[in-house]
Amino acid sequence: MDLTVYLLDTLVFMGIFALLAMSLNVEYGFTGLGNFGKVAFFMAGAYTYAITAALGWPFYLCLVFAALVAGALGALISLPALRLREDYLAIVTLTFGEILRIIIKAEQGLAGGVWGITIPSAFAGLDLTPRMTAWANVVLVWVIVVGVFVFLQLLINTPYGRVLRGIREDDVAVQVLGKSFVLYKAQALMVGSAIAGVAGGLFAQYLRFIDPYMFLPLVTFLVWVMLILGGPANHWGALIGAVIVEFFNRGSRFLKDYLVLPFDPNNVQFIIFGLLIILLLLYRPYGLFREKPLRTGAEAEVLKWPSSP
């Protein structure tokens, strides 16, 4: 493969996983929801995109519908799960991901079952070279990443975002103030799932082929590593964490050409991830980027007042 195309391919995957990390940041970083079934909503978005694209829908409609379906599944799973304790919520979401994958494996019609499904490219009619197609995908993915990043930054700095932070710290106190913490948790899970659905749609569009074996629980594990490494409750942390993890994930594939190891060189990345997490938990438990203190308009006005003599 052309080295430039491979580097562009890495940038595409960095952008897709940055979306997944930011979606988990909404749920866990700001709201305190332990979603261990993130891959389920990623998979739902990918298969929704693949099926609608195969039906001849325009690219943008496929992506929007992928977000809607994944968001609806997030809202659906939140109904029974959000009244459970955090550890039970993690078990429910993890189980949901495996159930959805088994259903898709057994479905031989629209989803293709274990044989997978082929997806037409969004740039099929443009007669582009592989390098030009790679550049087009990089631009497409990162424009969406920037848009989602700006949207989430604005959302978190609103009164709505402050309620989410309050639920993370003490949901009983939020309920005493008249806010339904169950409703807010459901909305946070729905927003995070919709973003994961967009990431899944981009993933399907880029690879042009998906099957159930691409959506193992390992994907959820990698997204959690990205968020913990970068720093929960900080979108810059989620973004940089995704870039770092994908750099090691894609770069470790070259090790077999330069190193002779007693084990598969592709497993070096997991050794590195484990060491990074241990060091972070020991010396920087909040990740590479600490959560920024909340600033409100009222606080800014108070800070303008002259201090008393």
Image (cartoon, rainbow, N blue to C red):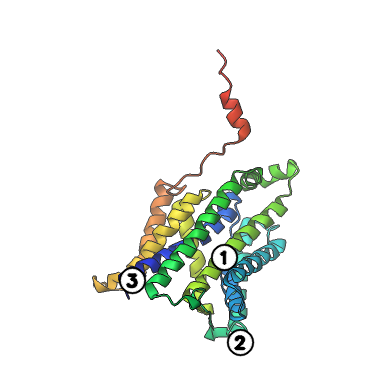
Seen at 65% across and 60% down, the residue is 190
Picture residue at 58% right of the left edge, 85% below the top: 112
x and y percent of residue 78 in the render?
Answer: 68, 61
Q: Is residue 108 above or below residue 177?
A: below
Residue ranking furthest to the right? 178
Answer few, some or many: residues within 10 Å of disc 1's Cα (few below 14, many 20 plus, some between 14 and 19). Answer: many
Q: Is residue 255 visible?
A: yes
Q: Identify the element where label 3 is drawn.
A: helix
Where residue 198 is drawn, which disc sits there? 1
Mark 2 neighbour density, 10 Å: few (under 14) some (14–19) many (20 or more): some
In the rendering, at what x and y percent does residue 83 appear?
A: 71, 57
Q: Which residue position holds label 3?
A: 253
Query: Measured from the top left, where is residue 28 in percent x and y?
Result: 57, 54
| In the image, farthest residue toward the front | 126
- Res 206 label: none
Q: Where is residue 5, by image quadrant? A: bottom left
Amino acid identity at mark 2: Gln
Amino acid under label 3? Answer: Arg
Q: Closer to the camera: disc 1 or disc 2?
A: 1
Residue at the image position 54 percent from the left and 78 percent from the top: 212
Q: Quadrant of the C terminus?
A: top right
| Residue type (three-letter) at the residue carrying disc 1 | Val
Q: Earlier in the sequence, mark 1 or mark 2?
A: 2
Q: Is residue 251 left or right of residue 152?
A: left
Q: Which mark is residue 108?
A: 2
Mark 3 or mark 2: name the one nearer the start of the chain: 2
* Of labels 1 and 3, the one closer to you: 1
Q: How many marks?
A: 3
